[in-house]
Image (cartoon, grey):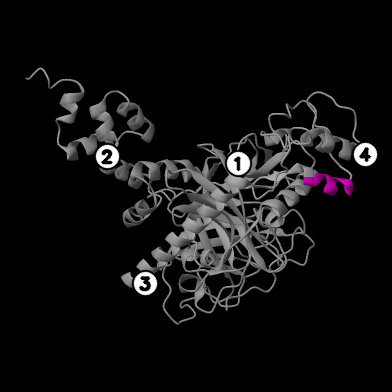
Amino acid sequence: MSSDLCGSRLFLALPDDILTIITSSFSPGDLCNLGLTCPGLDSFMSSHKVWLFQCDKLGLVPYTTLIEWRKGVFSYKALCRFLVNIQPMIGTWVHRNPELRHVVYVMPGFLSVVGCRIIPQEIGPLGLEDGPILWTPVFEILCNHVGSTSFFLHGKERGVDYVYPGLLKSVDRDCNVLLLEVEHRHQRGGGKLADLKNFTHEADNEVSSSQRIVGRKWTEKPFICLESDDRELLLEFVTSQVRDIVPDAANVLLFPRPRIDAVDSQQDFIVLHERRLLLLQMYERGNMNHDLKSDEGSPLNPTELGSSEISKSVDCTCNYPASQAGDATLHEFLQLGDWVGLSLQAETKEFYSCKHWPYMYESLSAFYKFPIRAPKACDEEYAGLWGGTFGLPPSADKPGKPLFLIYISYEESEGKQQMIANKILDGKSRLSPFNGSTMFIVNIDEPSMTIFPWNTDQQSNPISVMQSFKGEGICYWSRHRYPSIEPGSLFVLENGLLVYLWEHAREVLTLKRLYLGELLKRGERLPSFPPVLNFAHLTSKYRNIYPGFSHS
C-alpha cells in the first residue's frame, strides 16, 4: 500500500457514494468536528451531498421540498443547522386555560416552522377527510440565508394583521414548554426593541401586584419571577412598540398547498419565496434601527438610557416592598436596562402529568408539549391522534356535529395493558368534560362480549368488526351534576374506524386517525387574536371563545 494512502487520505480515496453511506451514521456535530481535522476532510464534509443526506435523515420535510428550500439558503449545511435547531419544537402543544382553544400544532412551513392553533369547530359538509380544518397562526420562525432563526408572533388589532418580531432563544433537545417572555437586550439582534422610557407612562397608571418569590435567583430569569399581571402588562407594552403591519404580499400563504398540477405548485413556491424575503427584510430593518428614534445625546450603549429616570417615575406611583435577595418586582425588572424585546423560549421543565396530560400553571403564558407518539407495529397500533364526533349511526364524518380531537396512548396498570383516550380539543360551545380528561379506558387483553348493534353505516355500507375490547368511559349525559363512569366497549372496524359505545346511555363516539399537518395544508385560515391573547389566553375558562365557527 502506498505510504500516502493512510489516515484521512485513505478515507478520502473511497468513492463518494461509499463515503456518503459511512458518514450517514454521523450526527451533524460529528461531521463538523471531523471536518476540523484536515483540509481534505473539511472539503468533503462541506459537500452538498453529505448535508442533503443529513437534512433528509431528520425526516421533517420531503426530499423534493429540501431541494426547493435550498434555493433560499447558502448551502444544505445552513439548512441543516436550521432544521436541527427547530426539530424539537415540531408537534402538538396544549394549554388548559381556557381548555377549548389551546391546541397548537407546530409544523414545517416554507423555510420556516409555523405554530397553528386548531379552532374548536363543527365538522364541515365535506367531512374530516376532504373538508378544510379551521386554524389561525400563532407564531412563525423563519430560516435566513445562513440557517439562523427569525421569530415572529402573529396577531390582529383593530382589523389589521401584524407581526411582532422577536428572538428565538436556545431550544432544548427535549423541550416540553414554550414560553413567551420580555427580556432585556444588551446588543442589537432579535428584531425590533422597545424603549422602556416609554413604559413609565404606562407604569404611572398601574400599581404593581408583584409578590416576592423567595428562594429563586430572579436575576437569572427575571421575567418569569414577576407577578402574572405585570408580565401581561410588559408583554402588552412591548408588542405595541415592535409591531409591523403585514403587507398584502406576505399575508397569503404560510405553507404550500397540496397541489396536483406542477405549475400551480411552482406558483405557490414563488409566492412563498417572495413572502419570506419580505419578512426577513422587515426583521433586519428592526435590527438596524429598532424602529425607534433615539435622542441625539443618547449614549452609544442603549441599555444605559435613563435607568434612574425610570426608577424615579415608578417609585413615585407604586408601593413596593423593601428589596430582599432572591425576590423580584416590576420595579427591579425595570432597573435592569432600558431596551427590551420579545423572546420565545423552548425549555425542559419537570412537571406532573395524569394519563399523559401535563399539570399546567394557569397564570403562565406558556404551551406544554403533548407526547404524541407514532403507533408501533404490533402492541400499540392504535396510539396517536384521532378525530371524530358523537351520534348515530356510527360515523366520524357528521356535518354540523362538534369535532373532537382524541389522543390514544397505552399504559400498563395492575399488570394489564390499557388503551387510554384523552380529549385534547372539544368543538362544543360549552366545555364538558374539560380538556385532558379521559374519555374512555379499555383493557386490550379483555375482549368485549357486547354485540355491535349496527350492520350498516349511514351510507348503507356493511360494517365489519375486527376486534372489540371491554372498558369504561366518562358519561356526561347523566342527570347528575358531575359526570359519571359507565361501562362500555370499543369496536375496531375493518374500514379503520374506532367506535366506542356507552352501554347504558347508548351514546356512540366514532373516531378516525388524523394527520394534522396534511389537514392544515388544505385548511381554512381565520383571523388571529391580539398578540398576547393569541399566544396563551388566560381568562374565560370552560368556554369556547370561537363560538359558532363552521366551514364556509
Label located before the other in sequence (3 or 4)? 3
Q: Identify residue for label 1.
A: 345
Residue 404, how many percent across, how many down? 59, 64
Q: CA distance from mark 3 to mark 2?
A: 32 Å
For the record, the magenta segment spans 198-206
490 in relation to 365, above or below: below
Q: Identify residue for label 2.
A: 47
User: CB of mark 4 within 8 Å of CB of mark 2?
Assistant: no
Residue occupying image coordinates x 63% and y 60% = 162
SS at mark 3 in the image: helix
SS at mark 2 in the image: loop
Q: Nearer the viewer, residue 334 or 488?
A: 334
Q: Nearer the viewer, residue 277 or 524?
A: 277
Give the total of numbered labels: 4
Estimate how packed mark 1 is, as few (under 14), some (14 to 19) or many (20 or more) residues with alpha carbons within 10 Å: some
* The residue positioned farthest toward the bottom in the image shown: 460
What's the amino acid at mark 2? Ser
Q: Which mark is residue 316?
A: 4
